Amino acid sequence: MQYLDLKMDFMFKQLFGHPSRKSITMAFLNALLHRKEDDRIVDVQFENTELTKETEDGKTGRLDVIVRTNRGERIHVEIQIIPQYGMPERLLYYWARLFSSSLSKGERYDTLPPTIMIAILNYPLFPHETDRFHTIFHIREDEEHFLWSDHLEFHVLDLSQFMVKWKKYRRDVKQSPEWPWLTMLSAVDGRTKKVDEEMVRELEGIAMTEQEILEALEEWQSLSVDPENRYAYEMRLKWLLDQLSNIRGSREEGLKEGLEKGLQQGLQQEKRHIAKKMLAKGYDVQTIHELTELAVEEIERLK
């Protein structure tokens, strides 16, 4: 069976953002949010669930998943495989828009629902601060650490770090409730067209005892073989690969420009050093200008 990469936002929303697969979405969210027993989400209503048709150039509308739970919470799930500039601020902005849009004119502020942002990334958002694959954020008082409000909650899941932990500390990883779902997201790499067969076998094993995982695998297979889905997926993948190529090209060009700029600055500094020595030995400004090509005004300032 050939699976399509669920990290592609198109496929992600097909599986987790469609009303017909609501049970999969609830199981997924409960695992990511570590909800158990009476705390579990038992129903969701989807918002912004329309899927934008792909075009030849791969352009599409936003493909996030937004739900309102039976507890009145609003949850926004975004998946990104391309590093985005200013991602922490971007997520905060999206949270603020979603939170504020919940309040209708004339309603009291205390009717605003808890709003949860879940960011699933294929790169570390805070590489120098943590090596955990799931980090959770709230606003707390600096010294006594009590919550400002339980209405704000951020989850960041780093699939690249999950893969590192999976390979080194698999037994520990399996203690986390989200591991089957992160395994599902990590098992296929659309860019290299590789499938981690060991991960797939792990999923097939757990599907024998967990109905939600079995259902998710069956739906994933069905979506992966659908011709219309595959075409839309390939168009989206092509667009994302072009974006990655452009980013790499920009970085390489920036590195080249930075190197050239650094060499130029070093050369200018050396010229000024030589000019100072020549001034100390009594050379006139015009001679120094001709030998170093420094501007006369700059040589005058070195006196």
Image (cartoon, rainbow, N blue to C red):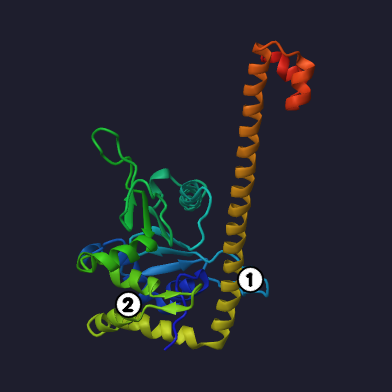
Q: Secondary structure at mark 1?
A: loop
Q: Residues within 10 Å of mark 2 (few under 14, many from 20)?
A: some
Residue type of the residue flagged with mark 1: Gly
**The disc label shown at residue 58, or none:** 1
Q: Earlier in the sequence, mark 1 or mark 2?
A: 1
Q: x, y percentage for residue 80?
A: 48, 62
Please name whichever residue, 124 or 203, is drawn nearer the observer in this view of the structure: 124
For the residues labelled 1 and 2, the Cα–Cα distance comes to 29 Å
Q: Residues within 10 Å of mark 1 (few under 14, many from 20)?
A: some
Q: Name the quadrant containing residue 184.
A: bottom left
Please name whichever residue, 164 or 124, is drawn nearer the observer in this view of the structure: 164
Asked whether the viewer can see residue 178, the reply is no
Residues marked 1 and 2 touching at CB (< 8 Å)? no
Asked if residue 84 is positioned above or below residue 81 in the image, the reply reads above
- Which residue is at a point 30% across and 66% down the rendered structure image? 30
| Residue underneath mark 2 | 199
Please name whichever residue, 150 or 112, is drawn nearer the observer in this view of the structure: 150
Residue 219 relative to residue 234: left or right: left
Asked whether the viewer can see residue 266, the reply is yes
Quadrant containing the C terminus is: top right
- Which residue is at a point 36% across and 49% down the rendered structure image? 151
**The disc label shown at residue 148, or none:** none
Please name whichever residue, 216 or 106, is drawn nearer the observer in this view of the structure: 216
Q: x, y percentage for residue 263?
A: 62, 38
Q: x, y percentage for residue 207?
A: 27, 82
Residue 37 relative to residue 116: left or right: left
Q: From this viewpoint, which residue is outermost toward the front?
A: 281
Q: x, y percentage for residue 297?
A: 75, 17
Q: Secondary structure at mark 2?
A: helix
Quadrant containing the N terminus is: bottom left
- Which residue is at a point 20% across and 66% down the rendered structure image? 175
Residue type of the residue flagged with mark 2: Met
